Image: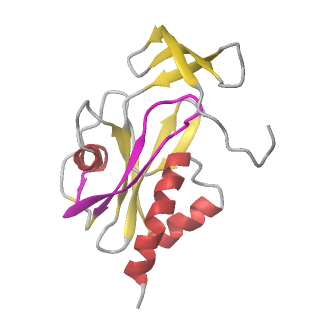
Amino acid sequence: MSSSQKPQRWKKLGARPLTQTRIFSVESVDFQHPAHAAPRDFFLIHAPDWVNVIALTPRHELVLVRQFRFGTNDLSLEIPGGVMEAGEDPVTTAQRELQEETGFVGTSARLLGSVHPNPAIQTNRCHLVLVAEAERRAELAWDPNEEFEILTLPVEDVYQRAYRGEITHALVLDALLLFRPVWERLRAP
């Protein structure tokens, strides 16, 4: 195949469940390329959709959380977020997760966009939601394994931390990318 040819859609032939955890399931899936006789085996992770929340305060600060992440075995500076319940609206989930994790509640919320966390192996989406006029007005309601440091930082400070590599969570960086045009309009004279 030359670099000028368009890639072709593979045909899904069948799938076999491999494991089920409380967070995700894994299956082995056979796909066949149209130009190849032999099918190939791939692994897919099925997880619920997630939300990540850009919470903007009236003072033009973003609400951040620092928490321990098991995959990196380190603390991570992030925006609030969490798993969606089956059939739940992303904006509703975002407002709930923001309130539970940080105690912040906003006056309006809207979807900025949705991304595929890792389309090579994951089937879910992450929905990125903006909550405006966020203020701390509620009690915290952390899950048993949650523990957060809650911070508010000026928007430009958050972007500088991202540029310096202090924010490395890819989905947080996606949210900051989608929020940038909104922020540029808000701060324009």
At x 50%, y 16%, the residue is 26
At x 66%, y 24%, the residue is 33
What is the x, y in percent for residue 5?
A: 73, 44
On screen, residue 95 versus residue 166, left or right, reads: left
On screen, residue 34 versus residue 94, left or right, reads: right
At x 43%, y 34%, the residue is 124
User: Toward the viewer: 96 or 26?
Assistant: 26
Residue 40 in the magenta stretch? The answer is no
Q: Quadrant of the N terminus?
A: top right
User: Toward the viewer: 85 or 165?
Assistant: 85
On screen, residue 184 versus residue 168, left or right, reads: left
At x 40%, y 22%, the residue is 23
Residue extending farthest bottom: 189
Residue extending farthest right: 2
What is the x, y in percent for residue 128?
A: 39, 52
What is the x, y in percent for residue 38?
A: 70, 13
- Tell me which segment is drawn in magenta: 103-131
